[in-house]
Image: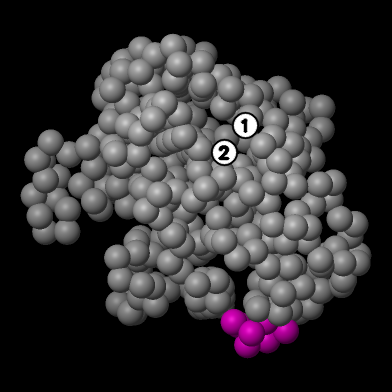
Amino acid sequence: MAANEGRVVTNPRRALITGAAGFIGGRLAAQLVQQGWEVHALVRRSSNTDDLAGLGISLHVDDGVSALHDVVGAAGPDVCFHLAGYFVGSHRDGDIARLVADNVLFGTRLADALASRGGCTLVNAGTYWQHADGAPYRPVALYAATKQAFQDVLRYYVERTNLAVVTLKFFETYGPGDSRPKLLNLLLDAAASGRSIGVSPGQQLVDLVHVEDAVAACLAAAAPSLAARGSGYHSFAVTSGAPLQLRQLVEQVGEAIGRPVPVEWGAREYRWREMMQPWDAGAPVPGWAPAIPLEVGIAEMWRIMIAPPAAGDGQASPWPSGSSSASSRLLAST
């Protein structure tokens, strides 16, 4: 049995998460535990799992070689959230092997074990970078190409076995505790330090989804009724629905934090296949919509950056009721 906000849950749903040591995966793991799920995480030997300690999660270590049937058998997942992957925007020779191993080979080993066991839905993390210019498939980088390759592998398992798959095409995610060198983090760092950051001319679009909304999308994708629809293979977009030009984003960041962001416009060239018009990466997840306004998310990140909260500080949450941002702030402060 597991406790869920004061209620006793019998026969809780079971989840297996890859990428639980990552930005979205860690928040998802905490939210699943809070909702009464039995949670298992499949991690690398090199993964830093400190943020998962104390959550009551069962950890399984992948050696990168052995079949994953035993892990899947021990976890017995109703849903597997496959969020692990290797990202590099512009690859070099040394990145190729890891891009293929992490984004194609590892996922295939996992899918094979899940399909052999049966009775599981795989929620898979894709990327809007698979859809440059809104095309059905036009990769922005080799990273996106490996994500597409794995989706093609998954289609085989869906058609050959009873594995149900829901792929989520994530746009940019952000939120407290994000250590990745992402654009919003760099803008906030520039505002805090006063050191100008070199950027493009600023006409490209940026589509930002708060990490708590991304977690909510994962949970919506795990609904049994969704996986049971149609062919068993589904793909949806996790988008704000309101992309901003970079110049608009810089202005909005300045308004949210109460100080200008020093940027040097035109110091960098646009990337290949930059998003200059809104891209269609698919329909949104049924029953899901982003709930945290961008200005609220930016202000919270800024507050934590300039005055990290002490554990148990008792401050009221600025998030809408029902969100799990309290757990994200705890993770951010560790």
Relative to 290, say whether 85 is above or below.
Answer: above
Residue drawn at (67%, 37%) of the image: 136
| Residue toward you, 247 or 241 | 241
Relative to 110, say whether 141 is above or below.
Answer: below
- Residue 147: which disc? 1
Q: Residue furthest bottom?
A: 258
Circles 2 and 1: CB atoms closer than 8 Å: yes
Relative to 249, say whether 208 is above or below.
Answer: above
Q: Quadrant of the N terminus?
A: top left
Q: Which of the two discs, 2 and 1, labels the residue nearer the N terminus?
A: 2
Residue drawn at (39%, 77%) of the image: 318
Is residue 256 shown in magenta?
yes
Corner quadrant of residue 186: bottom right
| Residue toward you, 245 or 26 | 245
> Under tag 2, what secondary structure?
strand
Which percent across, then down, holds residue 188? 66, 72
Which region is colored magenta? 254-260
> Under tag 1, what secondary structure?
helix
Amino acid bearing label 2: Gly
Corner quadrant of residue 40: top left
Q: Quadrant of the C terminus?
A: bottom left
Amino acid bearing label 1: Lys
Residue drawn at (40%, 49%) of the image: 286
The residue that label 2 is drawn on is 126
Which percent across, then down, holds residue 154? 51, 22
Taking the image as shown, residue 246 lies to the left or right of residue 48, namely right
How far apart are the two marked residues, 2 and 1, measured between alpha carbons?
Answer: 6 Å
Q: Residue furthest front?
A: 230
For the question of whether residue 143 can be seen, the reply is no
Mark 1 crowdedness (10 Å alpha carbons): few <14, some 14-19, many ≥20: many
Taking the image as shown, residue 16 lies to the left or right of residue 333, namely left
Residue drawn at (35%, 39%) of the image: 226
